[in-house]
Image (cartoon, helix red, strand yellow):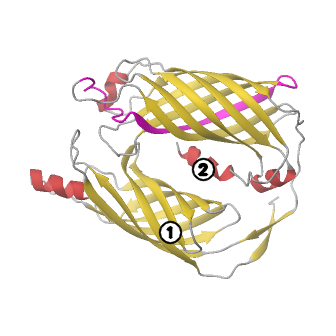
Amino acid sequence: MRFVFILISLQIYHSVNGQSLKSLNLNGHYGFIFVHSKDVENTAGSRPIGLSVEYSKLKFDSISFNYARCYPKTGFGLVYFNYDNHVLGHSVSTNYFIEPNLLISKRTMFAPRGSVGLSFLTNPYHHVTNPNNNSYSLPISVFLQVGLIINHQLSKRIGLNLSANYLHISNGGIKDPNKGINWMSACIGVGYKLNNDEFKKQTYSTEIRTQKINRFEIGLYSSSKIVSKGEKQRYFVPGIFTAYHKQLNNLHSIGLFADLHFDYSLAEKQNRTNEALHYHFASLAIDHSFLMGRFKFWQQAGYYFLEPDERFIKWYHRWGLNYQITKHIALGGSVKAHLHVAHFADLRISYSFPINKNRSLNYVRPV
């Protein structure tokens, strides 16, 4: 699932006009569901079958190639899946995908692939009509996909693709139950090139001008959670963080975060049950960000230095997207999870400032 967000960095300045191949693809999927928790054992043996239609654009101009160090392909898709299980039903998903393609022969390219979107699901949990669905409880959830794909051009217009994919659907902890649907699929597809541009192999330039700006950041975020499945009352989850970011080049920065938040749904549960629950979470995290103009897509791996509640493991991962509305202020959101289970999704605001002057440096391609 993580590649979905890593590959978003390759959405590189599509406002710049360049040579591209535009294609329409029709793909067939067949797979199997992972039973990742005893709560979803009723999905064992399910064999999802699907069909997808995609529109894509592969850029091969010199600017795009030298900025991304590959031939970036982006596009939109519409995906249908029958989960082969009456509890799960069916889904239709819209998604945006990215492939950083590497040329391995004159007609063949290989790429990791990531996509993100929304799924519209037919049979969510209901305490009366579908009480056994612990996988999802909302009719609309987040769709994530990561895979490996080979694209081969059969003729001037027709192409063939083969891929292996891991797919995930969940609501980010907004509503329980939310164990998610996790499945693998093999895919075969046929593509048709829509325009007349002819692919041209590019070469690396020796230098690219870049800027490195290190920043200090402080911020607040907010979420809410329920105590038990089926309840409507939600409880406040506030948080505060501070961070240092070191920019590496045009696309990447790394950082160190300190984070503190309080989960008052656990405090309420403690009041009800008299259990000794820890509802404060203090942690340190390492961070990586993809820089895309005003947008920043970031990933964290964190460790709690205050002992968390025993139901939680001691580390977590978090995925977020920020938009810089002014020079110093950014708005965004993120999803925090322990392994495959989301803890909560949040909205956040932060203030940052540079701690070094702009420095234009030569980036030389490593040998």
Q: Is residue 180 left or right of residue 286?
A: left
Relative depth, front residue between 307 and 281: 281
Residue 357, by quadrant, is bottom right
Q: Is residue 273 left or right of residue 352?
A: left
Q: Is residue 190 above or below residue 200?
A: above
Relative depth, front residue between 168 and 22: 22
Q: Residue 129, position in %: x, y?
A: 25, 23
Pair 1/2: label in front: 2
Relative depth, front residue between 223 and 32: 223
Residue type of the residue flagged with mark 1: Leu
Q: Is residue 348 magenta?
A: no
Dot 2 corresponds to which residue? 6
Quadrant of image for the C terminus:
bottom right
Residue 351: in sight, yes or no?
Answer: yes
Q: Which label's residue is closer to the chain start, 1 or 2?
A: 2
Q: Which residues are magenta?
A: 129-157
Relative depth, front residue between 143 and 161: 143
Dot 1 corresponds to which residue? 256
Q: Which mark is residue 21?
A: none
Q: Residue 93, position in %: x, y?
A: 52, 32
